[in-house]
């Protein structure tokens, strides 16, 4: 018997979208062994075997392929594995998600999932920055290379190697969403012209891509449910959240719950990106608190207090109150987190067109995010960017 029975009702309406399996986290992570069935916002009439469509296609080399670079760009012209084929009802959830053949299908599904989310935030589809040369993104699901990269016309995925165990990035939603973050920011903000690119171009690109990964991950119902159940709704408890983050398998959250300020980081790009990522995560938590108060699930003191200054006793009181409220109305907490995620996600997406890639400073990027946000979310983003020493308070 198949471990993943197809329990979705059959429908002949292709416009409803196309079904796939996605692992919200890699399947070796405890608690995420089973994939989620998702409907992607693409008509079955528009997908061909591969899968492929008008904006992307999977090319799965039959033999080892060297990673793309300045002297080697798509398309891949060597022999490829046979393209994955849709089922008789033209979905892609009939394939075993643990099979080799599913790597390309999974990578394709993750790319579409992330694009669907950011299309919604932007209010229009993402148009590839390389579209004049390559109308479609080439997805290479497995390269013999311990890395993943997105570039001019391509996304290619190698494998992680921890203790000699190789795991393909094609099954790693975080990694694919992060690489998509690079493609989205370049497509929206534009490509810098050579050496005149802004000082913080790469730092912002890394920070934004991690935010894309985190926010896209929070679009899986199963991910939100797990997060809220594990914390009993207490994203407000920073100590608790940090303890949670230390041992949690959700790598984006572990990365995002940091307390680094700009005066505490090195010049290294990923290190320098941490305060920006932390400010965005803090703002999601703040927006979540605001929504909880608005819906009557928490008292006003939750948003009037600087949570970084709370005593241990205050934390414990908040913990008990919130856990009780969560037990009574978990759906209200879920609604609050979804609204918070979208408040901040939309602001991030809409800030991109305000950026000049040739003069990109973190402060200007942060200011654009604040300008693109509304109401309470804008205030909190500003405060958090100030606390992280990204925006100058004067
Ligand atoms: Zn990156």
Image (cartoon, grey):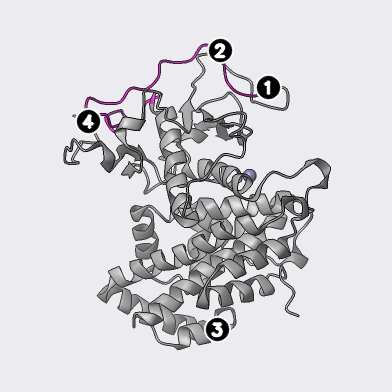
Span shown in magenta? 73-101
**Ligand 1 image position (quadrant):** top right
Q: Residue at x 56, y 55 (%)?
A: 211
Label of residue 310 in the image: 3
Label of residue 72 in the image: 1
Q: Give the distance between the C-alpha atoms of the residues marked 4 and 3, in whole angstroms.
A: 51 Å
Mark 2, residue position: 78
Q: Nearer the viewer, mark 3 or mark 1?
A: 1
Crowd around label 2: few <14 · some 14–19 · many ≥20 (10 Å):
few
Reply yes or no: does residue 86 show up in magenta.
yes
Q: Residue at x 69, y 51 (%)?
A: 270
Mark 4, residue position: 2
Residue 373 falls in which quadrant of the image?
A: bottom right
**Side (left or right) of 196 relative to 18:** right
Whichever of callouts 2 and 4 sits on the residue coming sooner in the sequence is 4
Q: Residue at x 51, y 87 (%)?
A: 304
Reply yes or no: does residue 175 show up in magenta.
no
Query: How many numbered circles are shown?
Result: 4
In the figure, 244 relative to 29: above or below? below
Residue 142 at x, y percent in the picture = 52, 26
Crowd around label 1: few <14 · some 14–19 · many ≥20 (10 Å):
few
**Which of the image's four quarters has the C terminus?**
bottom right
Label of residue 49 in the image: none
Tag 4 secondary structure: loop
Q: Give the distance between the C-alpha atoms of the residues marked 3 and 1, in whole angstroms.
A: 54 Å
The reply to whether residue 163 is visible in this rendering is: no
In the figure, 301 relative to 98: above or below? below
Q: Give the distance between the C-alpha atoms of the residues marked 2 and 4, in whole angstroms.
A: 34 Å
Residue 300 at x, y percent in the picture = 44, 88
Tag 3 secondary structure: loop
Mark 1 residue's CB less than 8 Å from ligand 1: no
């Amino acid at each position: 018997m198949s471990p993943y029975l197809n329990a979705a009702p059959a429908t002949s309406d292709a416009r409803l979208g196309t079904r796939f399996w996605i692992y919200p986290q890699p399947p070796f992570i405890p608690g995420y062994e089973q994939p989620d069935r998702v409907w992607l916002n693409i008509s079955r009439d528009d997908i061909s075997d591969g899968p492929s469509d008008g904006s992307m296609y999977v090319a799965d080399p039959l033999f080892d392929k060297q990673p793309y670079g300045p002297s080697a760009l798509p398309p891949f012209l060597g022999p490829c594995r046979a393209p994955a084929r849709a089922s008789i009802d033209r979905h892609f959830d009939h394939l075993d998600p643990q099979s080799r053949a599913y790597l390309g299908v999974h990578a394709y599904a993750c790319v579409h999932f992330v694009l669907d989310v950011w299309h919604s935030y932007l209010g229009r589809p993402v148009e590839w920055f390389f579209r004049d040369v390559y109308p479609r993104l080439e997805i290479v699901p497995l390269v013999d290379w311990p890395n993943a990269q997105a570039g001019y016309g391509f996304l290619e995925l190698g494998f992680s190697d921890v203790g000699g165990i190789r795991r393909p990035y094609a099954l790693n939603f975080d990694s694919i969403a992060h690489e998509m973050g690079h493609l989205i920011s370049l497509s929206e903000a534009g490509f810098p012209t050579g050496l005149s690119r802004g000082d913080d171009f790469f730092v912002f690109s890394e920070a934004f891509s991690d935010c894309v990964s985190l926010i896209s991950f929070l679009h899986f119902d199963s991910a939100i449910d797990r997060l809220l159940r594990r914390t009993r709704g207490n994203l407000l408890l920073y100590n608790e959240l940090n303890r949670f983050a230390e041992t949690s398998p959700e790598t984006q959250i572990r990365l995002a719950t940091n307390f680094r300020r700009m005066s505490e980081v090195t010049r290294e790009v990923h290190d320098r990106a941490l305060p920006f990522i932390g400010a965005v995560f803090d703002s999601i938590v703040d927006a979540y608190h605001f929504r909880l108060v608005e819906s009557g699930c928490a008292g006003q003191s939750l948003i009037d207090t600087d949570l970084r200054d709370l005593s241990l006793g205050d934390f414990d009181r908040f913990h008990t109150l919130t856990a009780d409220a969560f037990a009574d109305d978990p759906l209200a907490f879920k609604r609050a987190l979804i609204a918070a995620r979208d408040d901040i996600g939309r602001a991030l997406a809409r800030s991109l067109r305000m950026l000049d890639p040739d003069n990109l400073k973190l402060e200007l990027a942060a200011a654009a995010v604040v300008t693109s946000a509304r109401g309470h979310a804008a205030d909190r983003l500003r405060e958090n960017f100030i606390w992280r020493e990204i925006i100058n308070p004067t």
